[in-house]
Image: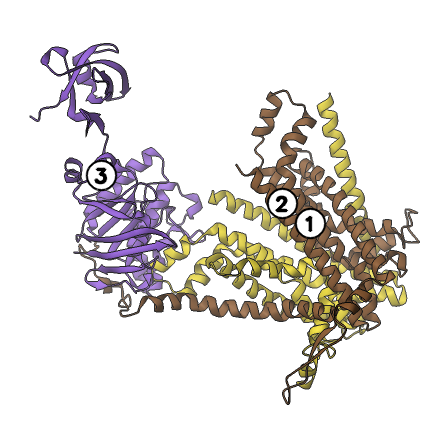
Chain colours: A brown, B purple, C yellow
Amino acid sequence: MDLPAKPSSSLLGAPPARKGWRRFAVRLRSSSGAIGGGSLIVGYLSIIVLIPIAAVVAHGFSFSIHTQGWGGAFWHWHLTAGFGTFWTDVTQPAAISAIRLSLWLSLSVAAINAVMGVAIAWVLVRDSFHGKWFVEAFIDLPFALPTIVVGVVLLFLFGTQSPLHIDLFETWMGLMVALLFVTLPFSVRAVQPVLASLDGEAEAAAKSLGAGGLRTFVSVVLPSLWPAVLGGFGLAFARAIGEFGSISLIAGGIGRTTTASSYIYNLTQGFLWTNAAAVSTALLVLSLIILIASNVFARRFQHRLAP
Amino acid sequence: MSISLSRLTKRYGPNVVVDDVNVEIPEGSLTAILGPSGSGKSTLLKLIAGLEVPDEGRVIIEGDDVTDVDPRYRDIGFCFQHYAPFRHMNVSKNIGFGLRVRKQPKDVIEVKVRELLELVKLEDKANSYPAQLSGGERQRMALARALAIEPRVLLLDEPFGALDAIVRTELRHFVKELHRQIKVTTILVTHDQDEAMEVADQLLIMHAGKIEQAGEPTELYERPATEFVHSFLGPTTLFKGVAVRPHDLELVSPSVGSIEGVVTSIMELGFEIQVTITLSDGSTPWVQMSRNEFRALGVTTGSPVSVRERVAQ
Amino acid sequence: MKHTSRKWSLRVIVIGYLALLVGLPVGYLFIKAFSHGLGAFWSEVTKPNAVAALKLSAEVALIAVPVNTVIGIGAALLLAKKKFFGSRALTLAFDIPVAVSPIIIGVALILAYSRIGWFGAWLSKNGITILFSPVGIVMATMAVSLPYVLRSVLPVLIEVGKDQEQAARTLGAGAFRTFWQITLPAIRWGVLYGVTLTIARTLGEFGAVLVVSGDITGKTQTLPIYIFAVWDQSYDTIGAFAGALVLASISIVALIILSSLRARERKLHVDLA
């Protein structure tokens, strides 16, 4: 090995050390890329998501800003009725019944799948049988399938010409089947990794103390699963309350089965943008509240459970 | 002097992690920075490498002030605690990375990589991927990768920390031998005093962000400047109210006119025996001796003995 | 035995639920679509309007997927490497499109960029139409498929850590080389996972696109819109099923890719441990 006893820096043609850079310059240089990239990302996010969402809320409250082009005044503000129209739009009987339908359907769907999600996750993690991989692959299918595909299939399977003679067309049960289908992966995948990470020591301890299977589950396993179950509940609820494609066909066109999303869509077809914006704002606030609430709850549980 | 640090300070928020460090590290030495976890030793190493930017002070390598120089232009070889192998490259590609960055011709890289593989004894693993290597092999690969660019300084962050006991000893000898061959100024960070004493020819003892003492291992062991260095560098026990090394004490029969006591416990650790004595003044020093000495004394638990300081011969 | 019977009943409940809820519809789709024969299926999917819809879907994906991939990787790098004020808000903002109804995303884009929206007057003066045009469809698709790359890459990036990048730097590599030769190969499975999800979501998006597209046959119909229109306007069962089958097949391929990637990712995790 002919490495020299005293290695010299320029042996391999490394550029000479740069001198004279002040520290702030080094820091600025190392983060200038991040600043540039960050602005680009925030800019894109604003154009695609943030500005449009702000526009919905503003329109919902009839607060609108219209641009007049480059010449003259760039901004032209006109502020109309404000909160009053928002309230009128949202409290129209059709709007109320649509929001009410979406709410109770989403809550029950999220609840049913929370229970089934725990059961499915339990079987996937703790049970073993032939063909389990197939069941595992099935879970993500509703997530991968485009919602309109689900809508078409459910319409024909549970429509007026149902081959099973189960007619759920224009009923809330039809909507529920569709929503249970599309929210399933959220409920299962939220719980599964947490269940897999429980090492079973606490369960074994409970059993050694004489607790039965069910008691062990309720008093030892379930408390550790709560945050995950709540997280899954929140995701499923948010998905259900915003769902449109999979339920749009089986709902038909009648008021009884018009969910909030369908109601907003119908308003856009009549070019009733201010009404659409008002109901959208209400729905937006509703799903954000549930999402944040389930996050907060989950975190509180997590804190309490942290060793 | 190969590396000199002056007034080097690094803060994370209100915590001063490296606190006004002034030190000179001699050319060609193998220096160990030794300290308990959280003493700032790894941060000090990263400051030398440029992976952390100091708040105050200068880093000078071979006379060049590199404080504001990006790590890529510092010509240092850095080995990470968990080796940081490039997982998607095989061993040869890993070792040759720095040479490819420096746009060396292909044949030169090939020869160089082969030499390095030989040096770190990984000839037969040239085409293996990091995932297929043992911990010790990964560490040797990381060493070769760092040495490939012929660094001015080699920096090793807890190089043996993640290895099991046998590989650890093996690799210690390997690093010492490697250093003897290529003589590149090397700094390693460790929390293990045995490791530091065995491998290094210079020690820096760090505690709470400050250098407690620097010098040769024997000097530090025999003449610790502070209480911390004394207790950190080797075993200590209290005798007559003073901290002493337990192997500087000896057991004698009670008649010789020293403090009397009784053997209260005996711990046999292979070659080494540790005997704890409860003295009449209530203190409980322990004495370290070889198995042969212990046999010759023939004491058991409950034997009346007395303790005194060994007389240097 | 009590224990075994409980285990069996749970197994039966779970498999029964999945079979009825998921297996039945998906199985029915394949049986029904082929029940009229392969010839009928082929003549349906080669109708000019179907081909035009497929083409538009592909074009939209070709723009939306690369843009969202670059943005997603960039955001993941930013969130993993830098601590900055508002990083939590940025993560949350990325999640808005999946937390909100796609219909609302569509309405939002119209209220911001169509003629009746904030920037409509200015945009139309400059010759840009959003409503009832492919531009609007692309924007709506970009919005709803935004978070997937970020969500898949960020955990992998955090797991991989900074060590390899720092090692490359000490060996003399610049930022550009470090990204292409070290960072990107280390996160490649995560990126691929996110890209697959983005493609699946892009091709399947319905609600948001429906609102902005105006549903003009042969012009602003993506494949999902085409399926909807074929049923809604002419009650064409075979046409709707044929289109649905094409989309379903794409998403099942995506699903297979995803699960094999997950298996690989697990293997990587074992290696890292």
- Report the Cα–Cα distance between label 1 and label 2: 10 Å
Chain of the residue under label 2: A
- Measuring 40% from the left and 65% from the top, which residue is drawn there? A30
Q: Quick one: label 1 or label 2, which is nearer the N terminus? A: 1
In percent of width and height, residue B6 lies at 22, 57
Direction from residue C150 to residue B222 in the image, left or right: left
Residue B251 marker: none
Secondary structure type for disc 1: helix
Q: In this view of the protein, can residue C249 be seen by the observer?
A: yes
Residue A298 marker: 2
- Label 1 sits on residue: A234
Q: Are marks 1 and 2 in contact (CB under 8 Å)?
A: yes
Secondary structure type for disc 3: helix
Q: In this view, does B195 lie above or below A90?
A: above
Which residue reaches farthest bottom?
Answer: A71
Q: In this view, does A91 lie above or below A139?
A: below
- Measuring 56% from the left and 33% from the top, which residue is drawn there? A199
In percent of width and height, residue A105 lies at 80, 50
Q: In this view of the protein, can residue C44 be seen by the observer?
A: no
| Other-residue count near label 1 (Cα within 10 Å), few / some / many at <14 / 14–19 / ≥20 | many
Q: Which amino acid does label 1 sit on?
A: Gly
| Other-residue count near label 2 (Cα within 10 Å), few / some / many at <14 / 14–19 / ≥20 | many
* Total numbered labels placed on residues in the image: 3
Residue B229 marker: 3
| Other-residue count near label 3 (Cα within 10 Å), few / some / many at <14 / 14–19 / ≥20 | some
